Amino acid sequence: MNPWLVLLVAGLFEVVWALSLAASDGLSKPVPTLVTVVALLVSMVLLARAVQDLPIGTAYAVWTGIGAVGAAVGGVVLFDEPATVLRGVFIAVVLVGIVGLETTA
């Protein structure tokens, strides 16, 4: 399977665990806590698979970037976090970095 696709899915599972961690209320709510643990495990397994074919520095930066962007956007949508212009600009900067790393690896 394409390692970039595996890495993308790993990053999406990182978003899931980050958002479910926020919803778990300090790991005190069982369902969001379970989702957090399962998504974290899946994300790590997929990241491990992706780094068999991709440089670790690039893969890790892209993985965390996907998670950061997804968590920031998810926080705005799901948890009423502030949606400011500057926040949007910096999210866009992270996206540019992710695409740049993918295209130069």
Image (cartoon, rainbow, N blue to C red):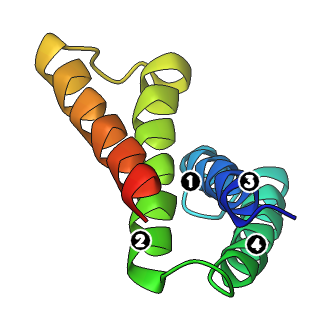
Amino acid marked by disc 1: Ala
Q: Are marks 2 and 1 in contact (CB under 8 Å)?
A: no
**Tag 1 residue:** 18
Which numbered circle lies on residue 46?
4
Q: Residue at x 60, y 48 (%)?
A: 15
Q: How far apart are labels 1 and 3 at the CA level? A: 20 Å
Amino acid marked by disc 4: Leu
Image quadrant in which the C terminus is located: bottom left
Q: Secondary structure at mark 4?
A: helix
Q: Position of residue 33 (x, y in %)?
A: 74, 61
> Within 10 Å of the Cα at label 4, are there few (<14), some (14-19), or many (20+) other Cα atoms?
many
Amino acid marked by disc 3: Leu
Q: Position of residue 47 (x, y in %)?
A: 66, 75
Q: In the rendered structure, which disc, 1 or 3, sits on the residue that comes first in sequence?
A: 3
**Tag 2 residue:** 58
Q: Secondary structure at mark 1?
A: helix
**Front position in the image: 43 or 4:** 4
In which image quadrant can residue 41 be found?
A: bottom right
Image quadrant in which the N terminus is located: bottom right
Q: In the rendered structure, which disc, 2 or 1, sits on the residue that comes first in sequence?
A: 1
Say which of marks 1 and 3 sits in front.
Answer: 3
Q: Are marks 2 and 3 in contact (CB under 8 Å)?
A: no
Say which of marks 2 and 1 sits in front.
Answer: 2
Say which of marks 4 and 3 sits in front.
Answer: 3
**Tag 3 residue:** 5
Amino acid marked by disc 2: Thr
| Left or right side of 76 for 22 | right
